[in-house]
Every structure is written in structure tokens, then in C-alpha cells.
Image: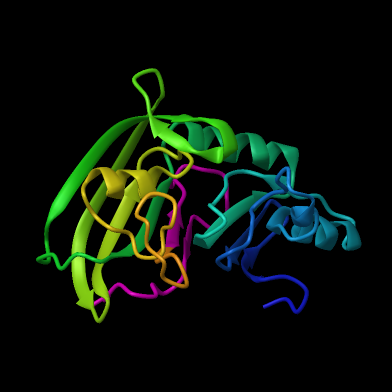
Amino acid sequence: MSKRAPYSILYEDDRIIAVYKSREVFTVQTDDKKTWRHNLFYYLSLRAKERREQVFLVHRLDYETSGILLFAKTKEALVELKKIFETRQVKRLYEAVVLERLEPGLREEIHLLLDVKENGKVIIDSKGKESITRFETANQIQIGTALKIEILTGRKNQIRLSLHKAGLTLIGDKRYSDSEAKRMYLNAYQISLPSESNFTKKEYFVPPLWLSMK
């Protein structure tokens, strides 16, 4: 873990860098001047400059969400990664904890049309972009039920709003679930690239925080 920034490097070669972002860190700068330096892209850009390299943004995670992010190190890698994400060839797995006590094995697929309004607020809108979220109830922990989640699209606040629409309370989500826990229990623990991609490493994984992997 960098002493200067809340992230750790999981993997790096000459085309790609995979990092694990801590919670309560912006992926990129926002309109707030306070985020000029307190964002992951800034830290990685500074590191790349010191190494006489480049770094390019591929996708994002919400400020409150911890988890794996991929960044490109060349423009060619950026184009390939962007295409993989846009054509839904990437597999992204998350874990979450909801307040409700649910039986293991419950599966649901939620389809929404999402639109981003002012101040970053995402709403359900008939003219919005398609959002597909799949989740399965896994194990129970002391504070609620752990979920295994896969997203087929990458919309802002997609998981948070999908769980809210399903009548579930994502612990720590102050925006949609009105939960005042100290942290939001949402974590991206795996990203898998298609086998036919031109990247040396195809799968990036960290042990889940709340899911039982038995």
C-alpha cells in the first residue's frame, strides 16, 4: 500500500496496471477542488510521470466503493480495454451486504434504464441507458446477508440503485438506502478479461471481504 495514496498495485506490465482502490477515494477528479489531489487517477498519473510512463483511465468505481480497477499504460491498450468493456466482454464481480436476512441461493436479474441528473444523482428514466445487474444471496454475517453480484453493464450507481429497486438495504449507502453505517458494504473483487484478448494476465482477483468462498 502506498504511504501517499490509498491504493495497492495488484499487477503491472508494460500495457496494463491493476490496482485495488480503498473506499472513500474518487477514481478521478470532480468539480470539488478538494479532489484535485485526492483521487486515484492523480496518484497513478504522478507515479507514471516519475517513471516516465503514461496511464489512461478505463472505467470507474464510486467514491464509497472499494475494489479492483484497471488502467491502460498505452493508447493501444486503452482502445482494446475500452472495446472490451463497451461490448460487455469483461466479467465484473462484486460483493455487497444488505440489511435484510435472506435465504442463501436467491437469484435475481434486475433490468433498469438509468439516467444521470444534476449533482451525480442517478434516476430510473425511460430514456436512460440499459442497466443489467445480477445478484445471488450467499452467506449471512452478523450485520446482514452477503450478496454475490455481477454487472453486465457499467452505469454510475448501478448496483446501489438496483438493490434499492429490489427492496434491499445496502448497508452504508446513504444516497439510496438511507443507511448510516460507517462504510458502504460494496466491494469489487474480480475482473476477468476474455481469453482472446491480447493481455498477458486475464484475471484479477482479491479475496472477498464478506463472501464465504467455501
At x 50%, y 60%, the residue is 65
Please name whichever residue, 51 or 187, is drawn nearer the observer in this view of the structure: 187
Principal secondary structure, stretch drawn in magenta: loop
Residue 197 in magenta stretch: yes
Please name whichever residue, 208 or 52, is drawn nearer the observer in this view of the structure: 208
Please name whichever residue, 131 or 179, is drawn nearer the observer in this view of the structure: 179
| Residue 148 picture quarter | bottom left
Give x and y (percent) for residue 162. Answer: 31, 44
**Side of 166 where 68 appears, left or right:** right
Whether 211 is drawn above or below 128: the answer is below
Give x and y (percent) for residue 190. Answer: 43, 60
**Side of 105 where 67 appears, left or right:** right
**Side of 29 where 178 appears, left or right:** left
Q: For the C terminus, give its image quadrant.
A: bottom left
Total numbered circles: 0
The part of the chain drawn in magenta is 187-214
Whether 125 is drawn above or below 104: the answer is above
At x 44%, y 51%, the residue is 175
At x 65%, y 51%, the residue is 71
Give x and y (percent) for residue 200. Answer: 57, 55
Residue 112 in magenta stretch: no
| Residue 83 picture quarter | top right
